[in-house]
Image: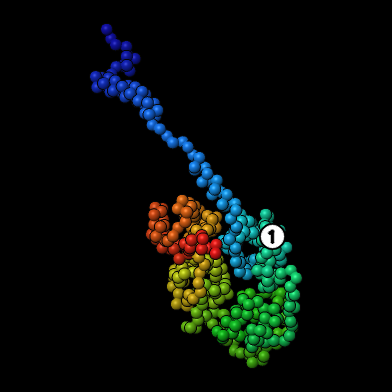
Amino acid sequence: MKRPDYAQWFYFTRRERRAILLLITTIIILRVAVPNMVNFMEFDTDLTEFKDEVRQYMSSLENSEPLPISIPSFDVNTIDAHSLVQYGLDPQVAKTWIKYRDAKGAFASVEDVQKIFRIDQNWVETNRSKMIFPNNKRVPEKGTVVQKKQQFEFDPNTASADSLRALGFSKLAIASIMGFRQKGGIFRQVEDLSIIYGVQDELITRLADFVLIDSVFREKAVFEPTIKTVAESEDYQIDINVANVFQWQMLNGIGPTLARRIVKFREGLGGFYAIDQVGETYGLPDSTFKSIQESLELSQPYLKMRVNSMVADSLKLHPYFNWKQSNILINFRDQRQGIDSIEELYEIRVFDSAFIRRAAPYLDFAPESVLQQ
């Protein structure tokens, strides 16, 4: 008799039948053995001690006093979000500060800063004397006497720093003027002041009638040193940690865009610890960096981040740390209740040696107890 077609689906060889029997036997054994093993094992589910430790830790956080933050004077229109967080602002408020400033164009007064959404008004009042606005003046504390700006005739080619200060020039503008003069730069007309970094148009307009340039400077030859020719001198050097946008532009190959990027990158880092770091600036060609490298010098210290007290939101604002790396480092620190040295970071598998060596100079591992003193 011919076997039906469907019968082939229910026919198994001897080897297949043995395998099916073994599988069924294994399932039965596991079904019986596993529940008995679970019942046999004893688990300690008493979490009372752990809960008490968590409760004590949270209580200590509530009773602890915040660390005092020493804030230097800062320009409200150039400061970055990373610095604002370090100065005590909430990270989200710091981002709102930058967005509001970009949309508005610039802050003109303390009242503009107070309009930032969710900003702590007590923080604004406490630090109002540290804020520097477009007129390059700090906002005086309430009750202080403001010295009025003076107006008198002066020659920008010979005026002293004290005279320029009395006229209303900022420290930054005075330093730029002195540097320009020392390198051979000459002012032949009032409009030449506009090329100096830090000199506001309002100040030039106010003092235009008081600028008296000696005929000796007016009659200088047309091939007198300009901004670029000043920088072409072999002895021209700039400190990469203090040079402003104007001074960077005095180097060959550095225009306004690259100058702003270098300064922004430096502020994000907290300062350079090596001249080679300048070459990491976005958009800066390697050939341009090598051509200006001999004109760069490093003499000013850079800022370090307090690893044992900072938060992840502040750390990830640093150009060398992304979101993932910041959270990994902070979690590693919290698990250990502090990090004592850079060597401990080598235990984090996602941090390679090159990354650790690059970031190490910016990390301060002082114990939190020392920071509180």
The mark total stands at 1
344 left or right of 111 in image: left
Residue at 69% across, 74% down: 201
The spot of residue 297 in percent (x, y) is 47, 76
Name, please, the residue furthest toward the bottom: 216
Query: Height in image: 94 above or below 155?
Result: above
Near-viewer residue (49 or 89): 49
Residue at the spot of label 1? 122
Residue at 57% across, 52% down: 61
One can see residue 230 in this view = yes
Q: Residue 146 occupies which quadrant of the picture?
A: bottom right
Q: Residue 65 occupies which quadrant of the picture?
A: bottom right
The spot of residue 239 in percent (x, y) is 51, 76
Near-viewer residue (173 or 129): 129
Where the N terminus falls, by quadrant? top left
Residue at 74% across, 83% down: 151
Q: Residue 123 occupies which quadrant of the picture?
A: bottom right
